[in-house]
Amino acid sequence: MINGKKIVVVLPAYNASKTLEKTYSEIPLEFVDDLVLVDDASKDDTAAVARNLGINTIVHEQNKGYGGNQKTCYRAALDLGADIVVMLHPDYQYTPKLVTAMASMIAFGEFDAVLASRILGVGALKGGMPLYKYISNRFLTFVENLLLGQKLSEYHTGYRAFSREVLERLPLDANSDDFVFDNQMLAQIVWYGYRIGEVSCPTKYFPEASSINFLRSVKYGCGVLMTAVEFRLALLGLISPERLPRLR
């Protein structure tokens, strides 16, 4: 708990048995009230490892996709009474040690959502991010900042924190169940006028860390561009998509 706010860490997992225990060992449990892992029909023993660690574990009988996994994560965290939810990948690509810093930025009322940026600070390339992913990250972020009217360093990190109000208000079920869910969610956060903060986060790329292949990356990039264009068209009043309803 931080400043009287209940902190819940959610772990959207798929085949994370080799890295889960290492991730768990670095979570600042003295500040975290609950943990929830959602196993998206893994082919390994992720769920068993999670249960052995004492983590609240939910198993999807069928794979629902990265976005579908997050939807379950957030519903479970809210059901546990979370005031702040931190979404952390259990593949150990991001350091769990930043949970406290990210949650504090929300707990003390400075921001409504916080992103752990791989671009700020030492940068993603030193952590092993492939060059093509770095270049596409910078290009997509530039376009998104232009169309969403923001100045974020990146939109593609998998390490995020949200206030309860944000998760309760956003129409998350209108979003994709695939990887573009992350960007649709950020577009919604901007649409509703919530404040987004960032912290610098070192990243690690290694064989066990989850990463989508080139073709999935292309599909993701197209989805990101469509999300940004959709936001701008909605802002101009030309369309009114379900995930970006008109605000009165």
Image: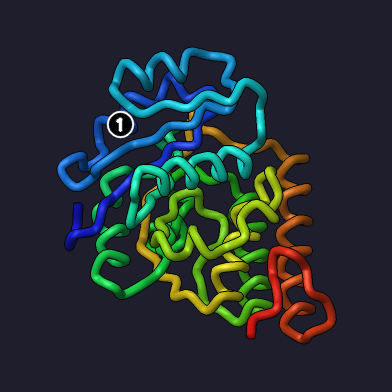
Q: Name the foreground residue: 92 vs 61.
A: 61
Residue 6, horizontal then vertical, whole percent: 26, 52
Q: Quadrant of residue 190?
A: bottom right
Question: On screen, 215 above or below 236?
Answer: above
Residue 11, horizontal then vertical, whole percent: 43, 37
Residue 231, horizontal then vertical, whole percent: 72, 73
Residue 183, horizontal then vertical, whole percent: 62, 59
Q: Name the foreground residue: 136 vs 35.
A: 35
Is residue 141 visible in this depiction of the protein?
Answer: yes
Image quarter (top left, top right, bottom left or bottom right) of the C terminus: bottom right
Q: Residue furthest right?
A: 238
Q: Quadrant of residue 35?
A: top left
**Image point (24%, 53%), residue name:** 100
Crowding around mark 1 (Cα neighbors within 10 Å: few <14, some 14 to 19, many 20+) is: some
Question: On screen, 34 above or below 104?
Answer: above
Q: Is residue 246 left or right of residue 134?
A: right
**Image point (49%, 60%), residue name:** 168
The residue beneath circle 1 is 24
Question: How has the structure been colored for display?
Answer: rainbow
Question: On screen, 119 above or below 207?
Answer: below
Q: How many marks?
A: 1
Q: Is residue 245 left or right of residue 53?
A: right
**Image point (31%, 43%), residue name:** 96
Q: Is residue 96 left or right of residue 93?
A: left
Q: Name the foreground residue: 143 vs 138.
A: 143
Q: Disc 1 residue type? A: Tyr
Is residue 204 visible in this depiction of the protein?
Answer: no
Callout 1: SS: helix
Question: On screen, 47 above or below 87?
Answer: above
**Image point (71%, 69%), residue name:** 228
